[in-house]
């Protein structure tokens, strides 16, 4: 059975939701949702990376919610890493445009010369 998630658990910025709605409209993907998922381990710190895709295949065990007019889908494994996460869209002139997932539940790691929390990318002082 599909589980509805409280929208306060994962937030989507207005910039991200606008970008997602534009992509859905441009590609004529009406009825599609944004799937956010764990996509393997991150940097040498051992954290996780997150992936995103637009799809219309929602499984019974998925958790769904709507934020800023965008339907978001998360699988049962990834949800634990995404509780409290914030999804944003940035357009940096030097690094380009893209989505960022900032999650407090991505693994935090202590190093002898400092700490690092991986939520997609980080630089570690190894």
Image: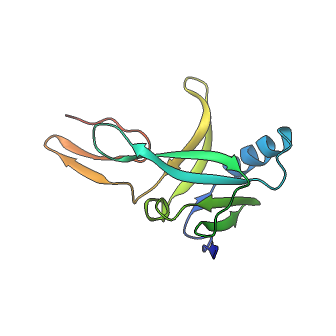
Horizontal side, residue 43 vs residue 17: left or right: left
* Snapshot quadrant of residue 97: top right
Instruction: Look at the picture and state if 63 lies above or below 125.
Output: below
- Could you say which quadrant of the image residue 41 lies in? top left
Q: Position of residue 48 (x, y in %)?
A: 39, 47
- Residue at (32%, 35%) from the top-left corner? 123
Q: Position of residue 73 (x, y in %)?
A: 63, 60
Q: Residue at x 34, y 47 (%)?
A: 47
Q: Residue furthest top?
A: 94
Residue at image point 60% right, 48% down = 88
* Quarter of the N terminus within the rendering: bottom right
Count of marks overlaid on the render: 0
Determine whether, in the image, residue 44 is placed left or right of residue 1. left
- Tell me the quarter of the image containing the C terminus: top left
Viewer-proximal residue, 103 or 38? Answer: 38
65, above or below 113, in the image? below
**Residue drawn 69% across the image and 47% down it:** 54
Q: From the viewer's perspective, is 107 left or right of 40?
A: left
């Amino acid at each position: 059975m599909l589980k509805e998630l409280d929208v306060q658990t994962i937030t989507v910025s207005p910039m991200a939701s606008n970008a997602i709605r534009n992509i859905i409209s441009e590609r004529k993907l009406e009825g599609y949702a944004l799937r956010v998922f764990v996509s393997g381990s991150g940097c040498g710190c051992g954290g996780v990376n997150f992936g995103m895709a637009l799809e219309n295949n929602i499984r019974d065990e998925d958790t769904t919610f709507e934020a800023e007019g965008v339907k978001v889908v998360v699988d049962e494994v990834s949800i634990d890493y995404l509780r409290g996460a914030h999804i944003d869209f940035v357009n940096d002139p030097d690094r380009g445009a893209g989505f960022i997932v900032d999650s407090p539940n991505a693994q935090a790691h202590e190093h002898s010369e400092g700490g690092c929390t991986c939520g997609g990318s980080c630089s570690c002082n190894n």
